[in-house]
Amino acid sequence: MLLQVKNLAVKFRLKRGEIYAVNGASFSVDKGRTLAIVGESGSGKSVTALSVMRLVPSPGGIESGEIVFNGKNLLELPDAKMQAIRGNELSMIFQEPMTSLNPVYTIEFQISEAIRRHSDISRQAAAEKVLDMLRLVGIPSPEKRMKSYPHEMSGGMRQRVMIAMALSCDPDMLIADEPTTALDVTIQAQIIDLLYKLRERYNMGMILITHDLGIVAEVADDVVVMYCGKIVERAPVRELFKNPMHPYTAGLIGSIPRMDQDLARLPMIRGMAPNPLMMPPGCPFSSRCEHCMPVCLLREPGASAFPGEHEVSCHLHGGGLSGDGGLCDGSGDLRGGLHDGSQEVGRASGDA
C-alpha cells in the first residue's frame, strides 16, 4: 500500500475554543489508483490533504493518528527528512494557482527551483527539464511561456504550470486539491483528462479533492465522503453511485442535474452544517437528515462494513454495532427516487 492514513485527528486551537477539523479519518491509496474525497466546504477535505503533506497551518496541528507513506510514518520524521519527501516523492497541486505561484518570478524559475532542490543537476539541465514538463502538460509555445510571469497566463495555463511543477520530480503520490476551481467547463475537462493520463503514464497514486461528483464518477476508483471532519461513507466509486447508503451521500448524488429529469428546481440538502464550536450530541448530520431517529440525537454512529468494501457510519445501517446491515438491509433505499444508480461511471469502470 502506497499511503495509509489511520485515525487522523487535526485540531485547531482558537480563542473561542478548540475544534476538530478532521476527527478519526482512515483511508488508503495504492499506486495507479485515485481516491476522491468529497463533501461540502468545511467538511475537512483540504485539511486532510494538508495533513498528509504536514502543512497544516497555525493554529492547527495534527493531534493523533498515523500517516504511513512508502512504509514510513510521516508524523515521526524530522523536518529535514519530510522536506526531502515533500515535492519529491509526495507532491500536491494547491487549490488556487494564482496565489500558489509567486508573481515576481518567471515560470522557469519556479519550476526549476523545485527540480534543483531535489536533484543535483545544473541550471541548464533544469531549464531543459522545465521545457519538457511544460510540453508534457500541453502548454503551447513552451519556450516562450517558460519566460512568462504568472499574471501573463490564463487560469487554465497557470493550473497546467502547477501540475508541471508537482510532477517535475516524478512523485509516487499526487494530491490535487480542487484542481478545476474557477476554470470554465471546457478547461476543467482538459485538466481532468490531463491528470488522468498522467496518472496512467506514471502509475501514481492520486488523491482528488473536489465538490464535483461528475468528476468523481469520471476518474476516481474509490470515494471517501466527509462531513464535519468525519468520514461518513467509503466505497469503490461504482458501488457508491449505485448504492449510496448514508443520507448525506444520497443527498449529494441526488443534487446532480440529470438530463432525464424535468424538475422545477434541483433537490437539495436542507439546512447547514453545524458550527464546529457547538457540535450537537449524537450524529452531526441529524438536524438535516430526513431519516433521523431518536438514537441519532443521542449517540454518534460508528462504521459498519458491508459487502463490496463499503463502509458507512449511520444508525440506519447499524451505527457500528454490527456489520450485517443493522436496522436497514443496505439495499440503497435512501436514494428516494433522486438517483437510480444506473448511469455509467466513466473511466472508473475501465470502459473509457
Image: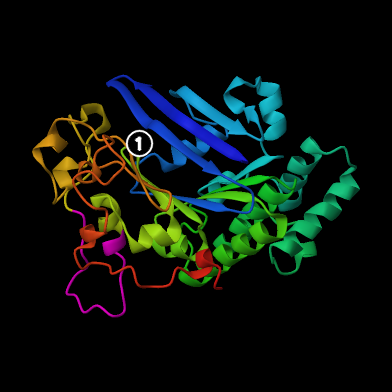
Q: Which amino acid does label 1 sit on?
A: Gly
Q: Nearer the viewer, residue 35 or 324?
A: 324
Can residue 228 be seen here? yes
Q: Quarter of the image containing the C terminus?
A: bottom right
Residue 56, horizontal then vertical, whole percent: 50, 30
Can residue 146 be seen here? no
Neighbour tally class for label 1: few under 14, some 14-19, many 20 plus, Cα within 10 Å = many
Q: What element carries label 1?
A: loop
Q: Is residue 256 left or right of residue 283?
A: right
Task: Determine if the magenta segment contains residue 349.
Answer: no
Q: Residue at x 60, y 46 (%)?
A: 30
Residue 302, horizontal then vertical, whole percent: 29, 34
Q: In this view, does 343 lie to the left or right of 124?
A: left
Instruction: Please state the total of marks drawn on the protein image.
Output: 1
Q: Residue furthest left?
A: 294
With respect to residue 210, does 121 lie above or below?
Answer: above
Q: In this view, does 9 lie to the left or right of 35?
A: left
Q: Which residue is drawn at 55% across and 53% down?
A: 34
Q: Residue furthest front?
A: 324
Q: Residue at x 25, y 27 (%)?
A: 277
Residue 130, horizontal then vertical, whole percent: 78, 53
The magenta span reads 253-269
Residue 240, horizontal then vertical, whole percent: 37, 57
User: Picture quarter containing residue 333?
Assistant: bottom left
Q: Nearer the viewer, residue 54 or 331?
A: 331
User: Picture quarter containing residue 297?
Assistant: top left
Q: Which residue is drawn at 89% across and 41% down?
A: 121
Q: Mark 1 points at which residue?
A: 229
